[in-house]
Image: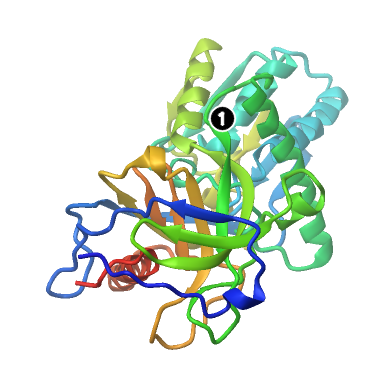
Amino acid sequence: MVLAMTLFSSQASHSASFYEQLQAVELGDTHFDAQGHVTTTGDIDRKVACLRPMRKGLPNISAESVGEQVRVHLYGHGGSGWTLLWGSVNKAVALFEEKAKEHKFNELVPITIIGAGCMGKAVALSLYHTGFQNIRIIAEQDDSIASLNSTGYLAMVSLATENESEKKQAEKLAIDTLKGYQMVEKGTHPIINEGVHLIDVYSGLGKEGEEGPLETYTGIEPYAEAGLLPKPENGVVKFSTGVSYPMRKYQTYFMDTKVLMKAFDRELKARNIPVIHETVGSLEDIKTYVVFNCSGLGAAKLNHDEKVYPNLGLLLELAHQPLKKLDYIIYTRYQPPGAPKRVSPVDKADIYFMPRSGGLLGATFVDHNDGTDNALNEALFTRILRENKQFFGYPLN
């Protein structure tokens, strides 16, 4: 039985410019075991723990000469690797080209890229497009990595910038990246032309102390303010389960990360750029004239960077979802009915639905956590499911 519930406590203060009826995520066949933990049956396919490579301040995008070798650093993007991708890659390649002129490198100079995430693969293809041909990627693995588990939400919500100057620099990278995805969508990007489309994003309008979805910083605001994405609208969303909420609608780009990574792999193969599975213990172990350090969390050791740390993201991957009817994102803080007042950071979502793969629910943002605390993980998985069931209007079992 579906619980019908309407939360209009703050509707009177929000003029509705839209009224939309949306298919709810199907969570009727989800269960908790005797310990209250989420079971991977029915509508839940898999529990996923992913570590974001956070860096205090800005990502490290820099170039240096170490003797005859040029080292370009490109890491520390947190959960915003896809959001800052093209801006970061373009900046790193430009820095390298300056160094290449100084060192008088030609197009056949040997280049080693450490890391096979979105940064490593995109920079390899960008270098090739620029004219460099002797490229290889070295990585411990290129499956089950953060770039594949990423939700694919283009928004400034998972960085550790510390001041307004850093925020503005990150926003410039993000805007340059947005322009890259616009080219992908139009089919005019020089590297890939699939896996990206505009999508509606819904966040709350409720005020502190109210129940339901609360007003949220979505990370789309800088794009909308710059006129690069549509201005948000206020209105009402009614889900197929019967629950209704006043919400704010944005639009941003959704990047299907699995499609994009497969496209990168296909393009790498076509250009004979190998991905070699090896563990790099030190940057000194790489003897080629050029090294791109795209090692993510590994940069803490490889570059002796104490600013790099893990941020734990937990996701529930879904099964049996009507994805054609679920082409939207929910990114909102949420106050469950009757629960203690929410104490999470105001710029982080509690309800986070993405239509990637079979659909997923998330996500946690736990700083300085390496994911090894299983008891905490299970408690967080349980919270994710409980609160999503309440949000979408399903009874708790």
Residue 183 or 167: which is nearer the viewer? 183
In this rendering, the answer to whether 30 lies above or below 35 is above
Residue 106 percent coordinates (x, y): 77, 14
**Rendered-image quadrant of the N terminus:** bottom left
Q: Residue at x 44, y 52 (%)?
A: 22
Q: Can the viewer see residue 314?
A: yes
Residue 354 percent coordinates (x, y): 45, 49
Residue 45 or 126: which is nearer the viewer? 45
Q: Residue at x 53, y 52 (%)?
A: 297
**Rendered-image quadrant of the C terminus:** bottom left
- Mark 1 lies on residue: 121
Residue 382 percent coordinates (x, y): 29, 69
Please indicate whether residue 294 sits to the left or right of residue 149 in the image. Answer: right
Residue sitting at the far left: 34
Q: What colour scheme does the image use? A: rainbow
How many numbered dots are placed on residues in this image? 1
Please indicate whether residue 396 sits to the left or right of residue 147 in the image. Answer: left
In this rendering, the answer to whether 322 lies above or below 133 is below
In this rendering, the answer to whether 174 lies above or below 262 is below
Q: For label 1, count other residues whose C-alpha is less than 10 Å away and answer few (under 14), some (14-19) or many (20+).
A: many
Q: Residue at x 58, y 78 (%)?
A: 10
Q: Can the viewer see residue 349?
A: no
Which image quarter: residue 157? bottom right
Which image quarter: residue 84? top right
Residue 167 percent coordinates (x, y): 77, 60
Looking at the rendered structure, the secondary structure element under dot 1 is: helix
Q: Amino acid at mark 1?
A: Lys
Residue 89 or 188: which is nearer the viewer? 188
Which image quarter: residue 197? top right
Residue 320 or 233: which is nearer the viewer? 233
